[in-house]
Image (tube, helix red, strand yellow):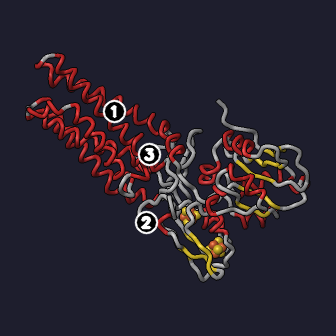
């Protein structure tokens, strides 16, 4: 798509099970990066590398056809979680303990995107 | 400064039981932007308690989530206030809210509206239809510029500490050649480090889409190289001595990784980087930044103390 930012290729953990899909279109509605399209009543990943792993699609898929390990793509958060520092700076990732929770980030008022 | 508004149900204009219900966060700016986008309209605004955090962040944390939404619907008696059963949520609440669960728990159907509140009038007038552009999260230059100061504060704090160290070392290393020379090297260090910060913290975010490479560290290398060329122009006459040449090699190895590191940190402010991608980038970028920086520092020490 024109003017769309793209990050690294072939990294996203997004996966779609088309057999489960009921074609409700929710993933198309919530995805902020136009990753999906709907053809003949089934969702399709058409723009895989644009996925930022926000988790909106899997959260809103009523039949669990979508799986993604969601998280915040923020280098400072990754560093802070590595050195065990929490909350002190803008963002940090909560060790998810295998539960697959999205990373936590503490937010300052000026933060408009990640944290 | 208080960035919160009270959570609860607000009336904009003179809404009645058929008026649409818009949902937002209790971050003051989210609320104000929503109101300002809808002059002269009659509708309800349901404000969730997101601890004063904007929609996108709160959705990521889960505070703008299914449970909070269902709770606010009930505690404000929304079923008695409106006769329809529809809620309009900002699209960026998607990571926190499961529309089908809200429907099951409260009876309300969640409709995700446009990403930007400025698109709301068009959305409402077209019977809740969105266009593909309304659904796309962009990252325009003004938004990037607005995020620069927040990122820079930390960089400048660190930069100041580093600059003082370089000043002390410049003094110790060059005092034999007179204090003017010591000051000269100290000031040049300060200028170089400031330029590295400008390169990674300002130039890289501003030029983001036009810089080569997808990884932010690579983009930062390019702007770092621009900064280095600028610094170099100041020192062309210093290149005649061995120490002068070594100092420039040292600054090459210092400015580029500093700039790359700061540019990499802008991934957090950006709106399209995935966690998997950031981790992948960091796996090679951070070791590279640290080793180049260390080598640069050692060469710089060599230029001051040995040559
Ligand atoms: S995780 Fe987010 S960006 Fe990726 S496909 Fe799902 S909704 Fe789109
Ligand atoms: S949300 Fe799930 S069921 Fe609905 S279209 Fe997307 S993948 Fe299919």
Give the image location of residue B47, x and y in percent.
Answer: 75, 46
**Residue bearing mark 3:** B205
For the residue pair A77 and B40, the one nearer the viewer reads as B40
Left or right: residue A59 versus residue A71 is right
The answer to whether mark 3 and mark 1 are in CB contact below 8 A is no
Q: Is residue A108 above or below residue B124?
A: above
Find the distance from the CA under tag 3 to the CA under tag 1: 16 Å
Can marks 2 and 1 be said to lie on one chain?
no
Residue A11: mark in rendering: 2
Of all chains, the one bearing label 2 is A
Q: Quadrant of ligand 2?
A: bottom right
Mark 2 crowdedness (10 Å alpha carbons): few <14, some 14-19, many ≥20: many
Where residue B37 sits, quadrant-wise, is top right
Residue A80 in view of the camera: no
**Residue bearing mark 1:** B194
Q: Is residue B63 above or below residue A89?
A: below
Element marked by disc 3: helix
Give the image location of residue A8, x and y in percent.
Answer: 41, 62
Tell me what residue is drawn at x 64 percent, y 82 percent.
A40
Residue B202: mark in rendering: none
Left or right: residue B274 versus residue B70 is left
The answer to whether the residue bearing label 1 lies less than 8 angstroms from the nearest atom of ligand 1 is: no
Give the image location of residue A91, x and y in percent.
Answer: 51, 45
For marks 2 and 1, give the one nearer the viewer: 1
Of all chains, the one bearing label 3 is B
Find the distance from the CA under tag 3 to the CA under tag 2: 22 Å
Residue B239 in view of the camera: yes
């Amino acid at each position: 798509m024109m003017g769309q930012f793209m990050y690294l290729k072939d990294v996203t953990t997004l996966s779609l099970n088309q057999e489960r899909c009921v074609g409700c279109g929710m993933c198309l509605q919530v995805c902020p990066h136009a990753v999906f399209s709907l053809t003949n009543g089934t969702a399709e990943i058409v723009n895989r590398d644009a996925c930022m792993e926000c988790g909106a699609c899997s959260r809103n898929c009523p039949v669990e056809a979508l799986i993604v390990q969601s998280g915040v793509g923020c280098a400072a958060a990754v560093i802070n979680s590595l050195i065990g520092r929490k909350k002190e700076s803008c963002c940090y990732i909560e060790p998810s303990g295998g539960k697959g929770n999205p990373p936590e980030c503490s937010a300052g008022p000026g933060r408009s995107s990640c944290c | 400064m208080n960035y919160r508004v009270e959570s609860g149900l607000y009336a904009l204009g003179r809404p009645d039981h058929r008026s649409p219900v818009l949902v937002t966060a209790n971050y003051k700016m989210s609320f104000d932007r929503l109101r300002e986008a809808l002059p002269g309209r009659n509708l309800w605004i349901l404000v969730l308690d997101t601890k004063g955090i904007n929609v996108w962040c709160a959705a990521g944390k889960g505070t703008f989530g299914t449970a909070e939404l269902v709770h606010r619907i009930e505690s404000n008696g929304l079923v008695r206030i409106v006769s329809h059963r529809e809620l309009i949520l900002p699209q960026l609440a998607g990571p926190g809210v499961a529309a089908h669960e809200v429907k099951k728990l409260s009876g309300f159907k969640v409709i995700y509206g446009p990403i930007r509140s400025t698109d709301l009038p068009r959305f409402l007038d077209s019977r809740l239809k969105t266009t593909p552009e309304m659904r796309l999260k962009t990252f325009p230059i003004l938004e990037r510029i607005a995020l620069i100061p927040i990122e820079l504060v930390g960089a400048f704090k660190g930069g100041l500490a580093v600059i003082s160290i370089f000043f002390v070392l410049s003094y110790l290393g060059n005092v034999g050649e007179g204090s003017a020379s010591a000051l000269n090297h100290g000031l040049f260090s300060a200028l170089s480090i400031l330029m590295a910060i400008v390169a990674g913290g300002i130039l890289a975010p501003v030029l983001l889409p036009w810089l080569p490479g997808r990884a932010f560290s690579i983009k930062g290398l390019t702007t770092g190289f621009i900064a280095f060329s600028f610094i170099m122009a100041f020192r062309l006459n210093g290149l005649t001595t061995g120490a002068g040449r070594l100092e420039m090699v040292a600054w090459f190895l210092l400015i580029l990784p500093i700039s790359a590191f700061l540019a990499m940190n802008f991934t957090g402010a950006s709106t399209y980087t995935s966690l998997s991608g950031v981790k992948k980038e960091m796996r090679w970028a951070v070791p590279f930044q640290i080793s180049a920086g260390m080598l640069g520092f050692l060469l710089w020490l060599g230029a001051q103390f040995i040559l």
